[in-house]
Amino acid sequence: MTEEFKSGFVALIGRPNVGKSTLLNYLVGQKVAIMSPQPQTTRNKISGVYTDDHEQIVFIDTPGIHKPKNKLDDFMDKSSYSALDEVDVVLFMVEPEKAGKGDHYIADLLKKIKKPVFLVINKIDTIHPDKLLEIIDSYKELGDFTEIVPISASQGNNVDELIKTITKYLPVGPQFYDADQITDRPEYFIVAELIREQVLRLTHEEVPHATAVVVDRMRDHENGKLQIEATIYVERDGQKGIVIGKRGSMLKQIGIAARKEIENLLGEKVNLRLWVKVQKNWRSDPAFLKSIGYNAKELR
Ligand SMILES: Nc1nc2c(ncn2[C@@H]2O[C@H](COP(=O)(O)OP(=O)(O)OP(=O)(O)O)[C@@H](O)[C@H]2O)c(=O)[nH]1
Ligand SMILES: [Mg+2]
């Protein structure tokens, strides 16, 4: 008897910073979602496609669910909730510590979902193995999870086991994407995100959260290099000063680091030009949010 091909969709849900994007990137073997030690790094749903001989799993990375403070936060939470409707399995990712308030909130939300929900305890490389049982017990109070899988997304520990376990719950189905397609997001989206990732890495306090990046041009080649122009939006003049830095030093650093990442992604040489603009309180401005792709109405 030949084994039938399986396929399905899996959502990565959890508090900010638990390692959802790190797991997505590990699964597809390339950086399609940016990662950072700052909470609220991911702002949109991003799919990552895992394909092997037996199955195709489309993982959907989502923004960390948190208390909304502005319209951007609303959009981020709505994006995460909307992913729950689209999938066959939900991975509820948590830190390797006792359940916190944010976890309780998400667990209550997931109780309403009539689908397999796995508790995925990430970052187990940071704890002593003896601690694991205690942590698992603390989460058992939060609900009945279909499976409980401890992993390390950054080191890949037990990720194979996670995939095997997911497969048990997937229906027989077609291959939705070519085996070499790893995301549904267009290249210009990932390019903008790679620039934002460097802003997250190199600036602090309120600047990372107040930053948005838009790619304005990415098509023409000059001297064999792809020409990319992008705008970094911030909310206030002071933030603009920080992103530009003394005699442009910060913007230069952001540009050099982002260019390397972009060249890595695209596999070609790039000439990256960056602008910084102030868009007052853009995180509360529905028209601007829509114009840069944070549009709640477009969420499925
Ligand atoms: N030690 C350790 N660190 C990890 C692991 N997975 C992720 N991290 C770190 O945790 C931080 C957050 O990772 P992200 O993947 O950006 O987390 P996220 O859940 O996508 O965060 P948001 O997009 O803000 O919701 C980063 O500094 C990662 O390097 C892990 O398995 N072990
Ligand atoms: Mg993320």
Image: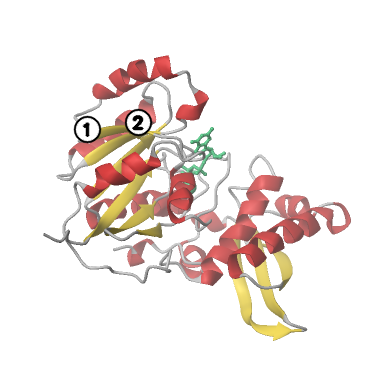
Q: In x, y percent, where is residue 240?
A: 73, 55
- Other-residue count near label 2 (Cα within 10 Å), few / some / many at <14 / 14–19 / ≥20: many
Nearer the observer, disc 2 or disc 1?
1
- Other-residue count near label 1 (Cα within 10 Å), few / some / many at <14 / 14–19 / ≥20: some
Q: Which residue lies furthest to the left in this view?
A: 1
Which mark identifies residue 103? 2
From this viewpoint, is residue 70 visible? no
**Residue positioned 41% across, 39% down in the render:** 67
Q: Nearer the viewer, residue 11 or 232?
A: 11
The reply, left or right, for residue 87 in relation to residue 262 is left
Dividing the picture into quadrants, the one containing residue 266 is bottom right
From this viewpoint, is residue 85 visible? yes
The reply, left or right, for residue 254 in relation to residue 169 is right
Residues tagged 2 and 1 counted as in contact (Cβ below 8 A): no
Distance of mark 2 from mark 1, alpha carbons? 13 Å
Which mark identifies residue 145? 1
Q: Is 141 placed above or below 23 here?
A: above
Q: Is 230 placed above or below 281 here?
A: below
**Residue positioned 50% across, 28% down in the render:** 125
